[in-house]
Image (tube, rainbow, N blue to C red):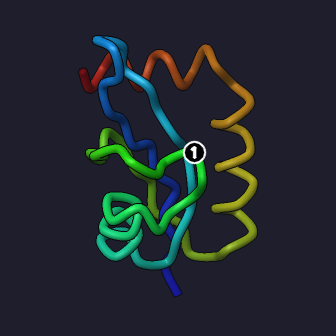
Amino acid sequence: MTYFVYLIGCYRNNKLITYVGYTSNLEKRIKLHNEGKGAKFTKGRKWKIMYYERYKNKRKAMLREIYLKKNRKLRNLLKNKYK
């Protein structure tokens, strides 16, 4: 099975905010976020995919998600690259 680690973004008060997650179905997951059925942080906003990576197993995807969530410097680089 294929897993994705993704970075989504949206603007709030003219500031770009981001969220990192992982899933096995990227399109469905983004749709859920935009319908208000995603993580609590993502509710009420319209998100766009800014970046994603593909993994062959869930463990590697989860480890990468944790790394991206904690590494603000890398996250900001990705964010700035895809503004």
Q: Is residue 16 above or below residue 20?
A: above
The quadrant where residue 80 appears: top left
- Counting from the top left corner in percent of width and height, residue 41 is at 57, 45
Q: Is residue 11 above or below residue 26?
A: above
Name the residue nearer the viewer: 12 or 16.
12
Taking the image as shown, residue 10 lies to the left or right of residue 67, namely left
Residue, x 36% and y 35% (percent of image)? Answer: 9
Q: Is residue 9 above or below residue 22?
A: above
- Counting from the top left corner in percent of width and height, residue 17 is at 44, 26
Q: Secondary structure at mark 1?
A: helix
- Counting from the top left corner in percent of width and height, residue 10 is at 32, 33
| Tally of marks | 1
Per the image, the residue denoted by label 1 is 41
Residue, x 26% and y 26% (percent of image)? Answer: 82
Q: Residue placed farthest to the bottom in the image?
A: 1
- Counting from the top left corner in percent of width and height, residue 35 is at 33, 65
Q: Is residue 9 above or below residue 58?
A: above
Residue, x 64% and y 19% (percent of image)? Answer: 72
Residue, x 48% and y 48% (percent of image)? Answer: 42
Name the residue nearer the viewer: 26 or 57.
26
* Few, some or many residues within 10 Å of mark 1 (<14, 14–19, 20+): few
Q: On the rendered image, what quadrant is the C terminus found in? A: top left
Instruction: Identify which amino acid the numbered label 1 is placed on.
Output: Phe
Name the residue nearer the viewer: 38 or 55.
38
